[in-house]
Image (cartoon, rainbow, N blue to C red):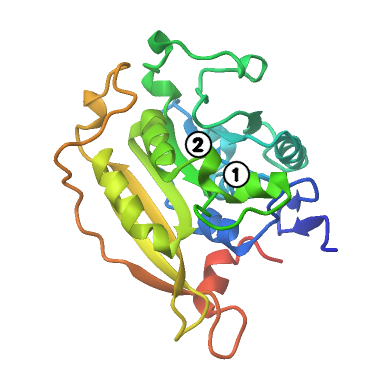
Amino acid sequence: MGSPNFRFKQFTVWHDRCAMKVGTDGVLLGAWCPLPHRPIASSPYRLLDIGTGSGLIALMLAQRLSSQSPIANNPYTIDAIDIDADAVAQAQYNFEQSPWSAQLHAHHSTLQDWSPSLQRSDLQVKRSSSEANFKRSNLYSLIVSNPPYFQDSLKNPNAQRATARHTDSLSYEELIMHSVRLLAPDGILALVLPIEAEAEILALAAEYGLSPTHITHVHSKPGKPAKRLLIALTLIANRQAQRTSSEANFKRSEPQAKQTTAQLFYIESATSPRSEEYTELTKEFYL
């Protein structure tokens, strides 16, 4: 049986109640994803972690933001949502034990039902169409997700693990569509996915008015095929302004996504289980 927790330099992640344990995918996304541009003075960053699990990625982002400058000069809040009540409870515990407990908030909610204006006590209340047009201040500067990714494979008999791993509860299209709904005009959507999902994600991104700014193909080691995709997307100019409360299912009719060259990244080297680039990327986190 594995350890019930994983210790990082500035925080510890307990994951014994979570279907998905601390793993390389989450660490990669938390360390790799671009941070949003500084908000307007006195306006805090708002970040959203979709399918937070143990809260790993949210904690990594809190550490990165707090290291830039004191929180008083760099205000932010991170909402972390998950459909698994046990995971939410454990994420909240991890947040409360961290140095950034005031900035981190775990919520039991699906992405489909999530609104940044909802409080913990009324997450079960369905939004009306009039509540879909959020104020700009409620939109997110950064949305991250290590989402479910098995679409056609045999499900795990453990229901909790199956939910965390399979796209039945959150398809790629729903992930993109609702992220666009919640994303600030200059916000970033950052994902880690199986490499096989690249073509589908890029097509969906173009349909919903998103353009890739960063693409990284992650290989286990040189000579091996890529296994994971790290991708950051932003709204194509002027598309956010065209959305209204009645456009929750907004799609682009004429995709104009710019070309972004994929970078290659290796987790291992020929002689070490951690390559120099992986060590450099994660040096502020691993003990």
Quarter of the image where one finds residue 107: top right
Name the amino acid, label 1. Ala
196 relative to 128, above or below = below
Quarter of the image where one finds residue 234: top left
Q: CA distance from mark 2 to mark 1?
A: 9 Å
Farthest bottom residue in view: 271
What mark, if any, has residue 47 been given in the picture? 2
Where is residue 50? Give x, y as percent: 54, 40
138 relative to 65, above or below = above
Name the amino acid, label 2. Leu
What residue appears at the point 39 percent right and 17 percent down from the top-left corner? 135
Quarter of the image where one finds residue 90: top right
Circles 2 and 1, Cβ within 8 Å, touching? The answer is yes
What residue appears at the point 60 percent right and 28 percent down from the top-left corner? 109
Few, some or many residues within 10 Å of mark 1 (<14, 14–19, 20+): many
| Residue 126 visible in the picture | yes
Where is residue 267? Give x, y as percent: 53, 74
Where is residue 25? Give x, y as percent: 56, 60
Nearer to us in this view, 83 or 181: 83
N-term-proximal mark, 2 vs 1: 2
Nearer to us in this view, 45 or 194: 194
Few, some or many residues within 10 Å of mark 2 (<14, 14–19, 20+): many
51 relative to 220, above or below = above
The residue indicated by pointer 1 is: 58
